[in-house]
Amino acid sequence: MLSLGQDEIAKYPFLADAGQYLKDKGFTLEQFGTDPDLKELITKAYERIQVAADGKIYKSDLIGDQVSKEAALPREVFSFLLAIVLLKLSGMHTLIKRFALAEARRAEKYLEKDLANISDESKKQLAIRVIDDLFSVQIEKLDDYFVIPVSDYLKHSINFHEREWKLINRHVENGQVFLTPHETVRLIRKELGTYINAKIVNAKTPTMIPGFEDSVNKLVMLSKKFSTFTVTTGEYPPCIKHAIDILEKGENLPHSGRFMLATFLLSKGQSVQQIAPLFKNAPDYNERVTLYQLNHLAGTSGSGTQYSCPSCEKLKTQSLCFATSECEGIITPLQFGKKRK
Amino acid sequence: MKETDIKFLESAFKKYYFEQFNLIRVPERTSEREFGYQKFNSGMTRHISVKDDKELHLLLMQNVPSDVYCSNAYYSFPNLPMNEKDWKEADLIFDIDAKDLNLSCRTNHTLSVCNDCSEISNNSEKCLKCNSTKLEKKSVPCKNCIDASKTEVLKLSEILINDFSINKDNIQVYFSGNEGFHIYVYNTQFQQIGSRERSELVDYIMFNGAIPEKFGMKKFKPNRNSFPDFDESGWRGRFSKYVYGSKSKRSKIISELLSNGYSSFQKTLDDVSENIGAKIDPNVTMDIHRIFRLPGSINSKSGLTKIHCKNLEKFDAYIDSSFLSDDTVEVLANCPIEFKLKNKKFGPYHNEKVSIPTFAAVYMICKKLATIA
Ligand code: SF4
Ligand SMILES: [Zn+2]
Ligand SMILES: [Zn+2]
């Protein structure tokens, strides 16, 4: 792990070890619920989530790059750590996603500023190391640009569908791609969001702490605004419907989800040509690649092996299962809706 | 194909595999590769693993395959079914084929073989004898095709070396055994990238998807300053060399481009891609599970060997890849176009019995232009 200075933790609070940080500062979570001065920070944390839920970026007390007040820095970090505690206590996944996304955008701004910093070499080095540590992307400074190996660039750029991100529209030299600080950070946007999201999802959920209840309840209310997903009955199992929903909304369906959907529909006798249009809305849609992958799964190209639809158990571990009572007793989505003897 | 023809081809291939085994070597990291083969008139056998040259030799002698393949990918368990193989990485591969180059010579030496009545006609849509549309296109050697393919190989290598900084020694060029070249690229930063990334590399190499902004033409308030210089590196440089023609014409051409406007510039980009992009087969490069013709093996489309081109410029495809014997055989030949193999001219033959060397007989039989008499 990186060793971070006070102002760096404030900028990139997701890099801190929460428990350790509190201990170092001499606090316990309970104190935040009872001490009237500290309790204010819970309100701050709630606001931080609220801003994120509205799709905005939390405006910090940090002004520009400067350390404004001695006290402001720890408060920044606390509001972030407490926000996570509140989110975990509320258990609201839609809020966690939105929060992670907004925090990623916030960090993005700082990373970009640090990369472009010409007066303070150490700030730039830290940003470079954050990017390397978190995303294994090795960037190097070359004159006014940052360069990264073409192969690393491709791993990230294939998630963008704007043509300007195509390799052909990039300055490529010596096996490296040249990027501005803005582009460098933009390149890892998705991974940054995923990283923060995973960090929150994987954090332990504490038991309710006295003094936290109000804010947690308010969060549950807040999240109602965003839960639009309803399960309807019909011929397809909930997991498949959910996947189709995501694609229709133009959101990103993970690879495992695409695998499930494609193998399911192929097993139901649909052709590669029928299935391919489903993926048209995906943010990273590429016709040639989609057809290649579908043909590969269908066994009509290359290997000749037809892949089968994963089991419900497997899908559960991949968080793709949205079981309803109708799913009872089946072991693969293919059995959904079939009468059993 | 007739039983007698298959027997003949098998014995010719077997002799080659027996006598020329030094030409057929297992690739490096053999035990991580998947092998496969096909026999005449039958399907593909794959998911095979091979330990060393000896084992490969045995496989060839026992099965006498028409074609032999080996993966460019490395697996933990190459002999297991595809989803259990555990893919590790794959060499970059490229296929350049004369038939994809839109060459004008193609019509002159492409024949249509009717699958229903075996009638052979000059490249047509329908069988002239029975009107069947089940035609197989067969092409006989042409120097122009090989020269044009070589040019594409050079374009590709130039991009790999200059833009991707790939060491020349890590690029190996093979004649495919028919009408094109296979290029292998080893030990690069690209070993572990997947097919979506490879598809992006393909677009880069073929000059697909370029946008005007990147090549100097802005949508709003375009100006001369952003246009590439003649000596720039990478695609901006290649583009300007092609479009300006010479340094001195740069200024004049830029004025023209500016006055023609943005959408016309986009069209220019799309048009020049045909000329400056390297014409590779996208499907081969992006396929990370492919088994690709094994170097040193015979290509059953021609009876010629897929062979390493140590010196591409001097390489003569129709001399340097023919290793079958000179023993004379009698065939019934129906090949209305003259061709040259091992420096000897053959044909044209119009449904006639001729005595010719084995290598030429195999060549025509593989193309369904002759049968054993
Ligand atoms: S139980 Fe099976 S069929 Fe039902 S939602 Fe979960 S994975 Fe799909
Ligand atoms: Zn016919
Ligand atoms: Zn030709």
Image: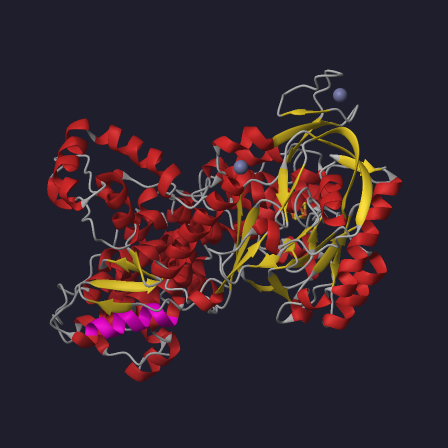
Residue A80 in the image: state x and y as whole percent.
31, 65
Report which quarter residue A96 is drawn in. Answer: bottom left
User: Which residue is at 68% across, 42% downward?
Assistant: A300
Residue A3 visible in rendering: yes
The colour style of the image is secondary structure
Report which quarter residue A90 is drawn in. Answer: bottom left
B194 falls in the magenta region: no
Q: Give the range drawn in magenta.
A: A123-133
User: Which residue is at 67% across, 29% downward?
Assistant: B336
Residue A176 in the image: state x and y as whole percent.
33, 62
User: Which residue is at 19% across, 47% downward?
Assistant: B228
Q: On the rendered structure, is A45 left or right of B138?
A: left
Q: In this view, does B177 lie above or below A205?
A: above
Residue A325 in the image: state x and y as whole percent.
68, 43
A132 falls in the magenta region: yes
Magenta: main secondary structure: helix
